[in-house]
Amino acid sequence: MAVGSNHGNGLFFRTLTEVQAQHIHAASSRILEETGMVIHHLEAVELLRQAGAYVEGENHVYFPAWLLEQALRTAPSRVTMYDRMGRPAMYLEGSNTYFGTGSDTLNFLDPFSGERRSWRTEDVAAATRVCDALPNIDFVMSMGLLSDVEKRMINREQYAIMIQNTTKPQVVISEDGDTLRDIIEMAAVAVGGKERLRQKPLLMSYTEPTSPLQHPAESIDKLLVAAEYGMPTNFACGGMAGASVPTTVGGALVQANAEALSGLVIHQLKRPGAPFIYGYGNSPMDMRTMQAVYGTPEAILFQGGLVDLAHFYNLPCWGYAGCCNAKVCDEQAVMESTMFTLMGALQGCNIMHDVFYMEFGLTGSLELLLISNEAIGRARRIQRGIDTDPAHLAVEAIQRVGPGGNFLGDEHTAQYFRENWQPDLSDFNNYENWTLNGSQTMAERAREKLKYLMEHHHPEPVPAEVKEQIERILKAASARLG
Amino acid sequence: MNSFGNMAEAVIAGDFETVKKMTQTMIDEQVDPIAIINQGLMAGMNVVGVRFKAGDMFVPEVMMSARAMSTGIELVKPLIADTNMPSAGKVVIGTVKGDLHDIGKKLVVMMLESAGFQVVDLGVDQAPADFVKAVQEHNPHVVGMSALLTTTMLKMKDTVDALKEAGLRDKVKVIVGGAPVNRSFAEQIGADGFASDAATATDLCKTLAQ
Ligand code: B12
């Protein structure tokens, strides 16, 4: 596959042509060569200087093309993420797609009181357990910012909650390299040591440097820590089109790609072959409200371009799905998030986060999470495409049933109907039966199911001694931070 | 008067070439430089403010108008004594220690400037001592702090305390903003004001700088 996504049975989608991808690559290379990047990290600048980059002053680095090409050669084209039991859970490669939540929303849209309030430890734990139960949520992020723990401990406490309430892989936020080290410790005790964690990564580090054309110290710190441990990391610089990247989708892609490649170079110099997930977070600025908005047509197109660039470079790719700007789980929420989910699936973005985000990432909704789980299910069926083998072309069945017959009574139907998508939250009842069931909207059905999952789903617990070790790591960190 | 009207129109249209030419013509015709600012350039910008709030203009257009206005101001500035320079007030602003989010703060700066404020932008990652030093140095009407992280928000209180300690708290109004910040937090840390967006921040500064 050169540029574009190959799904099942010939279903193919692409946003850029091969020639367009080449144009963007050339333009990004020009930016890196002629304008360069400011890198606020001495070790990284030194690595780059020794490798042959041009350094002006203390930290203004210019990247020759061969340096990019060298990094592209050493970076792996596929990364496997494992669950807590050490079973392969996500193959980040080609057009495979996986979905997960977002991190650190400030407000929790309490599904039962309808209140928009801050997150408490038990809310994040319950939300994580719900993710554990949902078949189309493949990985988790921290979802909510904890309002009931010491602020410097938030990322560590979030990790302790995640690892104990789901077996699914995690993408983790850490405020600095030190936090990340503690998180790695916790993961290592759960899977049986650092070497095992390196071999079978349970977590991916999330790094989000600042556009335009600069990398802050702590992002590079985390990038280098990840490379050092051989732990997968993304490097999704965050920008707002119209403010920190150009307002045109093409221009945003050129700059985003330049920044992503510069991160890749640093990462591969630290440890050639370390797993790197290419990507960028672009929320266009709405020019009336000045908000960083999610899931606009341009944001979706941007992601399509970015994924095609990842395919062009043969790198795994990071992106978004299932997120929105609405304040409550309403029609806008479902429209924006579902469009993003379906398009992301078709684009073949390997790992998409922020499912359940409302209000541009400031609020999280579990109703939206459940509705998105269903939308992802629909999208996944579409990704399988149309089977055209003899059994699916069903010539014999058509002949058997013949003119005026009915397929309902034919064995072909009985044999194959289960391959078709089946609704869970979507209501296909007639009007009378829908009323008999309480005339519920989809969000109401989602709340009902949430209640059920919260009461009945119990994820595989961590062993008692692991729990103790996690407590010990948390205590030590808390003591260190004073 | 009509030429002031045309100048205001050119500011509204964000046409800096025309604004530049008109300003130069007026200077050559010995029009009062303060009148050029107040009745021509600022008059245009005031309309822009109203139209933006009504949703008839977008941010990039406001920015073009602001640039057009400053092109004119640059030309008349040398003709006016510093003390007579019309200004809506002076604001010192920065993002607090540990926080690198600055898109919102930059927008606040641009909106304030386009409303005629003199703004000193300290940049990101500013410690309480940096704010204190800047207040001592620039003697502003208002000092503004921006924070987008729950962890760094706490630094706002430290700055308010540091201003108190330095004996500056009565001399300057303190305002705060950024996504996690809200009115009750502002009150809790003893700030004088909070605004949830750049347009409201400008109105707030107008009230506080009076
Ligand atoms: C863009 C962005 C980034 C960019 C910032 C680029 C830059 N140069 O600013 C990057 C990618 C660098 C980034 C990094 C991080 N981010 Co960030 N980021 C955002 C995002 C998506 C948008 C922020 C933004 O620019 N909004 C648009 C502007 C225009 O709005 P605004 O900032 O709110 O400003 C308006 C008002 O608040 C007000 N205002 C602002 N300042 C002031 C000041 C005064 C005095 C007044 C009166 C008014 C005022 O006026 C502005 C204009 O209308 C938000 C989510 C969100 N929707 O807010 C997350 C968000 C703020 N980030 C978040 C996080 C967690 C991080 C990271 C820690 C992630 C990581 N581990 O890598 C790092 C932290 C880096 C650091 N040390 O600061 C969380 C914060 C959670 C929290 N509150 O603690 C958020 C909420 C996203 C999330 N849910 O996870 N981020």
Image (cartoon, coloured by chain):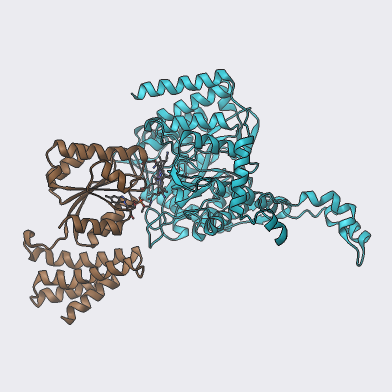
Chain colours: A cyan, B brown
- In front: A356, or B133? A356
Front residue of this view, candidates A248 and A265 = A248
Residue at 48% from the left image edge and 28% from the top image edge: A183
Residue A193 locus on image (x, y percent):
55, 21
Judge from the rendering whether residue B194 lies leftward or rightward of residue A189; answer left or right.
left
Q: Is residue A1 visible?
A: no
Judge by depth and name the residue closer to the eye, A32 or B166: B166
Q: Position of residue A318 (x, y in %)?
A: 53, 45
The quarter of the image holding the C terminus of chain A is top left
Q: In screen coordinates, is B208 left or right of A51?
A: left
Looking at the picture, does residue B137 appear above or below residue B41? above
- Could you say which quadrant of the image residue A476 lies in? top left
Give coordinates of residue A139: x percent, y percent.
58, 38
Quarter occupied by residue A286 = bottom left
- Which residue occupies the foreground of this view, A259 or A209? A209
Q: Residue furthest top?
A: A465
Q: Is residue A415 above or below residue A50?
A: below
* Residue B177 shows in the view: yes
- Residue A159 position, x and y percent, is 49, 31
For the image, the number of numbered tags is 0
| Point 25% across, 74% down: residue | B10
Q: Is residue A212 above or below residue A398?
A: above
Q: Residue at x 39, y 40 (%)?
A: A53
